[in-house]
Image (spheres, rainbow, N blue to C red):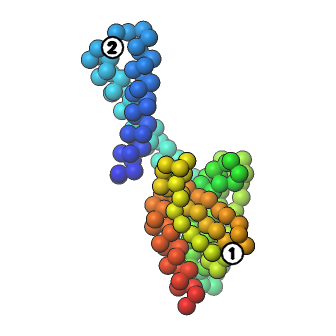
């Protein structure tokens, strides 16, 4: 719920500011203009946020991850973006007891699936997206490849990945 409210705020405030700026060219700014702009901004932000949440949820359900049938089980999964060059490729990130898997959804330019064994991960840490938002995940592999993701609850991902790496080493 907190994330939904933050999304509404992040969308609503710029929309409100732009609406007021646009109306200031034609109208005198009074309480009626401010109230109507605030109301339309709130409606826009609520509907857009809920629509985006619905689209994300439905597209993630369609992404199927193939697991090794022996003893692999899903520990954590959620929507994520995997950076391939400049593109943040949208899809699903899945942590199993054996590996980390990313599979893109079909609405990307660089569709791909990436599977990283837990033993291949040298370090995992949070990172800031655009140097301001703490929603990034940075993986450095033992071969020095680097993978960057945007995830919900980056701290949880880091802790859970580290926990699974410790379990696998035992």
- Farthest residue in the left direction? 31
Query: Closer to the camera: disc 1 or disc 2?
Result: 1
Does 54 appear above or below 120? above
- Near-viewer residue (36 or 22): 22
What is the quadrant of residue 117 in the picture? Answer: bottom right
Residues at marks 1 and 2, CA–CA distance in whole angstroms = 60 Å
Does 13 appear above or below 3? above
Residue 95 horizontal side relative to residue 1, left or right: right
Picture residue at 69% right of the left edge, 54% below the top: 84
Residue carrying label 2? 29
Measured as percent of width and height from the top left, residue 73 is found at: 55, 78
Picture residue at 59% right of the left edge, 72% below the top: 123
What is the quadrant of residue 122 in the picture? Answer: bottom right
Name the secondary structure under disc 1: loop
Residue carrying label 1? 142
Measured as percent of width and height from the top left, residue 121 is found at: 63, 74
Picture residue at 59% right of the left edge, 54% below the top: 81
Q: How crowded is mark 2: few (under 14 residues within 10 Å), some or many (20 or more)?
A: few
């Amino acid at each position: 719920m907190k994330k939904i409210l933050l999304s509404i705020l992040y969308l609503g405030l710029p929309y409100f500011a732009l609406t007021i700026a646009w109306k200031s060219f034609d109208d005198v700014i009074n309480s009626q203009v401010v109230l109507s702009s605030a109301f339309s901004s709130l409606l826009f932000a609520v509907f857009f946020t809920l629509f985006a949440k619905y689209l994300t949820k439905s597209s993630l359900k369609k992404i199927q991850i193939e697991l090794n049938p022996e003893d692999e089980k899903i520990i954590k999964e959620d929507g994520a973006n995997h950076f391939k060059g400049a593109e943040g490729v949208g899809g699903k990130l899945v942590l199993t007891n054996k590996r980390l898997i990313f599979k893109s959804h079909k609405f990307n330019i660089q569709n791909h699936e990436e599977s990283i064994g837990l033993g291949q991960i040298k370090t995992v840490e949070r990172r800031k997206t655009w140097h301001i938002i703490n929603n990034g995940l940075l993986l450095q592999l033992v071969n020095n490849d680097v993978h960057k993701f945007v995830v919900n609850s980056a701290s949880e991902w880091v802790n859970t990945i580290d926990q699974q790496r410790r379990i696998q080493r035992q």
